[in-house]
Image (spheres, helix red, strand yellow):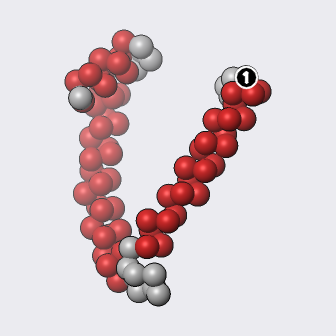
Amino acid sequence: MILFLMNLHVGLFGIMVGVRVAILLTARRRGTVVNPIVGMLADRTKTRWRNWSPYNQSHRVVIHVAETAKKMAATCGKLV
């Protein structure tokens, strides 16, 4: 899958291979730092709706905003 995405980004979008590799390495490094911190925060969260529930529900807002923006873009034309 990563090789397919690499070819897609290089061929279709014109992103250089070195830039794409840097993006992937940066995301991987960020994940090694952020994931344990988020895991500790989520494990220590105590609400009346269980531990993970606030984090499981928060993604709905992001998806709603993205869907609304997509619908607005479809009716108005291009975003960029």
User: Image check: 2 left or right of 64?
Assistant: left
For residue 67, above or below residue 49: above
Q: Is residue 50 left or right of residue 60?
A: left
What residue do we see at 35% from left, 18% from top?
8
Question: What amino acid type is highlighted by mark number 1?
Answer: Gly
Q: In this rendering, does residue 46 appear at all?
A: yes
Q: Nearer the viewer, residue 71 or 26?
A: 71
Give the image quarter of residue 75.
top right
Whether residue 41 appears in this view of the structure is no
User: Crowding at label 1, few (<14), some or many (≥20) Cα neighbours within 10 Å?
Assistant: few
Residue 53 falls in image quadrant: bottom left
Looking at this rendering, what residue extends furthest in the right direction? Answer: 76
Query: Residue at position x 48%, y 73% from top?
Result: 54
Give the image location of residue 38, x and y in percent: 35, 68
20 sits to left or right of 14: left
Q: Residue at x 50, y 58 (%)?
A: 59
Check the image and report above or below for 52 versus 9: below
Q: Is residue 23 above or below residue 3?
A: below
Task: Provide the residue designation for mark 1.
Answer: 77
Q: Looking at this rendering, what residue extends furthest in the front direction?
A: 49
Q: Quadrant of the C terminus?
A: top right
Give the total of numbered labels. Answer: 1
Residue at image position (68%, 35%) is: 71
In the structure shown, which secondary structural element does the residue marked by tag 1 occupy? loop
